[in-house]
Image: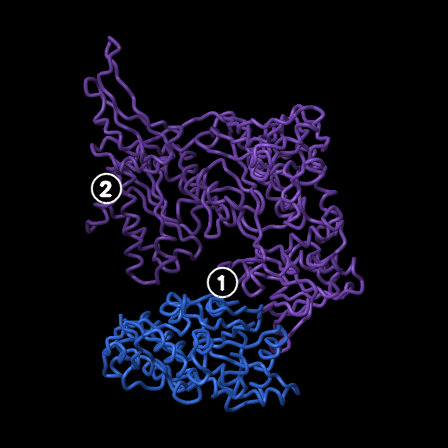
Chain colours: A purple, B blue
Amino acid sequence: MARIGVFVCHCGENISATVDCTKVAESIGKLRHVALSTEYKYMCSDPGQTLIKDAIKEHNLTGIVVSACSPRMHEPTFRRACAEGGLNPFLCEMANLREHCSWVHEKNDLTTEKAIDIVRTQVEKVKLNHALQPIRVPVTKRSLVIGGGIAGIQAALDIANTGHKVVMVERSPSIGGHMSQLSETFPTLDCSQCILTPRMVEVAQHPNITLYTYAEVESVEGFIGNFKVKIRKKAKSLDEKVCTGCGLCITKCPQKKIPNEFEQGMGMRPAIYTPFPQAVPNRPVIDREHCTYYIKGKCKVCEIVCPTKAIRFDQADEILDIDIGAIVMATGFDIKHADFFPEYGYGKYKDVIDGLQFERLASASGPTSGVILRPSDGQVPKNIVFVACAGSRDPAKGIEYCSKICCMYTAKHAMLYKHKVHEGKAYIFYMDIRAGGKNYEEFVRRAIEEDHVEYVRGRISTIFEKDGKLIVKGADTLLGGQPVEVVADMVVLATAGVASSGAEELAQKLHISYDAHKFFAEAHPKLKPVETNTAGIFLAGACQNPKDIPDSVSQASGAAVKVAALFSQDELTREPLVAQINRMAPPLYSTCVACELCIPVCPYQAIAMEEFKNRDGKVIRRAAKINEGLCQGCGTCVAICRSKSIDLYGYSNNQVYAEVVAMLNEY
Amino acid sequence: MKTGIYPGCSLNGSARDYNESVFALADAFGLPLEQVSDWNCCGATAAHNLNKNLSLALPARILSLAEQNGMDEIVVPCAACYHRLIVTQNELRKDPELKNQVCEILEMDYKGTSRIINVIEWIDKYIVPDLEGKIVKPFDHKVACYYGCLLVRPHKVLAYDRPEDPQSMDQVMTKIGATSVYYPYKTECCGAGFSISRTDIVSKLSGKIVEDAESRGADAIIVACPMCHSNLDMRRNDINKYWGKSFKIPVIFITQAVGLAIGLSAKNVGLKRHFVEVNIS
């Protein structure tokens, strides 16, 4: 006969402030088969867990219900306590009195009644629980890092240095990401390239890292420890092993009028190119969309001039199949461009540029070799306006969040401008200055006090051109909303940081969740900021939300540790809460009628058909079979099965019926 | 499809020129335009500052009458009336309880079935498709199209054109042979209702609008709002006095420009009623 123990948690005051926990424990104690019903202030604490362990032994319990919070955080805690008390951990159930009851209702009798009902259903359920054994699966000790910006580079190097293999996939022809485009970095003003390029080289040369640039993730199947990844290596149209990276083809390519992505459209590049001189790998690719040969069928200048005969016009995309144990997402971010802003001219004014374009203007390796020149006529701007929060924190633009990096980089931009154009005047229009970070506030003060950058608190309503100047209209909200008009030579918009293009499709390929803005979602905003909801997939850098370099690097190292921890085991244990198709003795074999409806509905491709043969080898019966390794226990197949042949361990039909019946019956 | 017209107060008063040009166009293209019977004031800027129910009931009565007249759509040439009517229709659509309340006040039925269109939409829908072959005197001038505040805002409610840098008037003008100049003052404030009480503010604000149009080489400012017209045209002397300039650029309703292009006489489209002399044709 079942002997159930019920443990009602107060969760400090989270539950007990609205639910009468004593009454819950007393009422439940009167139920049949309940051997013990008790309460405690913090069940998850050490004394709370000890209470459970001791009670299991003392009352010889056959199942327990912890009536506390959502199982998401503490189910593992209580299962562990259960196991330490000598009971199979899967004989523990949680009744969610916090999220489902105390947090969402007022304090009154009905709330306590509801709490009792919630616990009752779990008591009925746990009576039907079975002891289950965890599933063991092997771990492939090779990780995949998607994205080769600073976050991906840091994660890859950290994992590789623990001795594990890393495959890095980057979709552009070089790693380096946005950081390689930056001029100087805040708050130290050290040169971005100088600190980044050595790390890029390290990635390329590390014996544990395999680098695929100009490549994209085609598909991901499988689960933690056992992902099957397909990578599309786009045709670079040259043999990387033969090419020496001499660059002759780049200088001789007759097609030179393609907007340079690395220079944010402020320079031109040929059809065969490396994004920038310090690119890693330093091998060019042919941009087939713009290459004269691919458009008109003739040219081949690069092939003629190549001293090592490395050009391969007929090269095809290559698909690689790789077994992967853990994945780090490091796909970064994009920024909105000036054309997103109707009030700032829909991008039609040449001298209204975005922050990344200014980085290129200020960069020693940029299109102007670091001299600040405005794009329209190449003159040095005497008056320059920086607009912070262009798009960010603006619900009317659909971007409610703060892009986090703009306050700092705008201060840096104004500072760099003042260092290069001493007699120039720099204005920054801002909403608030958010300079939280080590030495950040001091940096902003420096811009104001030492470099005399004019900070004006207010937003810019409109920008238009008049007599070759930009008229910037706004308000000074510290002076009672007085209208301000600045006649500027150039305007830099600190446009909002947004999710990288293709982030949504990638998230769907990997089955990870993302938010309304297409940024990848963490498993818990505070305690699991590096994990995703999909086991074995971790986050690094600005693919989660806009982040500066130190934050991206820290998170990347965090993700690397998670991967290393995973790889420290040879086998993983998985919760055995998987679906099962019944089997019985011949000649029935199963009640499954082989309709195969469950196969297409399974989101994890975990179901296949099994054949039963007689002694002659003839197939006499077919039935569906579930791969325990792939099954995530979602229960979709259970719902669609017409012959009720599928059941979910831990959530069997009988258990769910028992819960429903308990809820419907008066007690 | 029956199209009615709600003229509002200005088209019978300070903007008779606008009224004449709308009807001259309707005649020229054979477009019947019946006035909403027994129409009343839309409430303009005054009502919604004083009493919300009043500000909704006044336009609701007009819309209700239009429904009774069997009008599927009504043209509202005045931008302020257009704005009040659409805002009311939107508020009553969102809140059925408020609608019932307003119906009770009016003691009339209101369904909200009549579509409200502004004069540019009307031209786009009924005149532009028939324009070919009718243009006898292309309006070959540089123009600055001035939309003012109410024709395109609030965008969420009106869902008409783009609120910053609108294009609809520019497109119509291009079709009758004009060249529209780059004109950033398109939707800046002209001073609106201060036309009566604070002419100094109107002189200052409207002055900038006029100055920018002239400085960009425009031969005329094109408008589609009687309030804008009176501020830029009727108040021109005040503007010139305030700025110490002598701006001469004429202010022409879009309906007048289209009328001239199809060969209607200056008198026919009301050009003789302007304060600033219109010396282009």
Rendered location of residue A90, percent (x, y): 36, 35
Q: Secondary structure at mark 2?
A: helix
Q: Secondary structure at mark 1?
A: helix
Q: Is residue A606 left or right of residue A550?
A: left
Task: Say whether mark 1 and mark 2 are on the same chain.
Answer: yes
Identify the mark at residue A12; answer none if there is no mark.
none
Counting residues from the N terminus, which is met first, the one under dot 2 or under dot 1? Answer: 1
Seen as rendered, the residue at the extreme top is A616
Observer-nearest of B206 and A227: B206
Tell me the residue that label 2 is attached to: A658
Tell me the residue that label 1 is attached to: A395
Q: Are marks 2 and 1 in contact (CB under 8 Å)?
A: no
> In which quadrant will I find the N terminus of chain A?
top left
Chain ID at mark 1: A
Rendered location of residue A220, percent (x, y): 46, 33
Disc 1 marks a residue whose amino acid type is Pro
Within 10 Å of disc 1 (Cα), the crowding (few <14, some 14-19, many 20+) is few
Chain ID at mark 2: A
Quarter of the figure with residue A650: top left
Rendered location of residue B138, percent (x, y): 49, 71
Observer-nearest of A59 and A260: A260
- Which residue is rendered at x = 61% and y = 83% of the image? B247
Residue B176 vs B192, above or below: the answer is above
Rendered location of residue A645, percent (x, y): 23, 30
Residue B6 vs A366, above or below: the answer is below
Disc 2 marks a residue whose amino acid type is Ala
Quarter of the figure with residue A659: top left
- Which residue is rendered at x = 44% and y = 30% of the image? A573
Observer-nearest of B167 and A204: B167
